[in-house]
Structures are given as structure tokens and as C-alpha cells.
Image: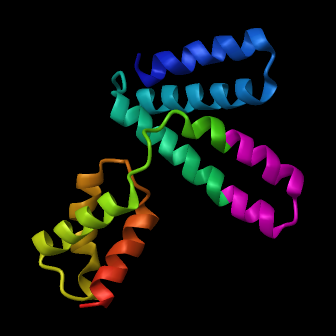
Amino acid sequence: MNIIERVDQELKEAMKAKDEAKLSVMRLMRTAIKNKQIDVGHELSDEEAQAVVRGMVKQGKDALVDFTAGGRQDLVDKQNIELGILETFLPAAMPAEELEALCRQAVEQSGAKEIKDMGKAMGVVMKLVAGRADGNAVKEVIQKLLSTK
């Protein structure tokens, strides 16, 4: 079952269970996916749908920082629930050891020697991780590797 079918199925289940939080997230996700389909003009692949969900997770995490800074614990709690639901639609995160190995490989392939060459290595490694690692985590590992050279 692909992501789009799974969203539709879980939307129906949330309606039947009267789970308002999950229903809201499923509706938002379905709308975001449909909007992306309209933008690109074709049915989304699983990878494209995952990219939409990753974007939603990133927006949610950014909002979480703002809510925490604003002292809005009610919104923090709500956002954490929504993020938990969204993250179930993404593949499991890559283990740190595997990420570091891929980053080492990317640094060698790209010929990056110092921090200013970080963009070269980032481009290579982001293709290798294929959405299984957060860009910020990749950036931290590459910075660490290049700063020790």
C-alpha cells in the first residue's frame, strides 16, 4: 500500500473512531498531497509523497520551536501529537553510524577538504541518504568531518 492509499485509509479510520487530532492531520496531509499532485500534473510516487510529508514535519518542528519560545505549552502538546502522526508515514531514520559512513564516503567522493567545500559533500550525501536522514543531521556530521581535517 502506498502512502496516498494509506492516508485515505487512516482518514476513514479516524472518522469512524472520531479521533479529531488524527482526522485533522490526515486531512491536512491529504490536502498537501493533492496540491502537490496538481502542481506537478501527475500522480505522486511514494518518494514524492514522502517529500511532502517531510516538508510538513519540518514545518511542524519549526512551529514547535516558536511555540516553545512563546511559552504556549498547549500548542506544543498539540504539535507533538501531530508530528508523531506525520512521522509514522516516513521511513525509519538512518542509524548514526550508517549516516557517518555515508558522509565520509561523500566527503571523499566530492574532494571536500575544508568547511567552505561543504556544499559539494552535502550534494553527494543527500542523494545517498534519499530522505532517510534529516538535512540538519547530515550537515552536523559533515561539519564535524571537515573541521577535523
Q: Residue at x 69, y 40 (%)?
A: 82
Position of residue 103 relative to residue 8, above or below, is below
Tell whether 113 sits left or right of 56.
Answer: left
Name the main secondary structure of what is drawn in magenta.
Answer: helix
Q: Position of residue 71 (x, y in %)?
A: 87, 65
Asked whether 116 or 107 is in front, the reply is 107
Residue 110 lies in quadrant: bottom left
Q: Residue at x 81, y 15 (%)?
A: 18
Q: Is residue 9 on the magenta stretch?
A: no
Q: Position of residue 53 (x, y in %)?
A: 51, 39
Region of the chain picked out in magenta, as a range = 63-82
Q: Residue at x 64, y 59 (%)?
A: 62
Position of residue 132 relative to residue 16, above or below, is below
Position of residue 46 relative to residue 121, above or below, is above
Position of residue 49 relative to residue 75, above or below, is above
Q: Position of residue 117 (x, y in %)?
A: 23, 82
Tell whether 58 sits left or right of 135.
Answer: right
Q: Quadrant of the C terminus?
A: bottom left
Residue 124 lies in quadrant: bottom left
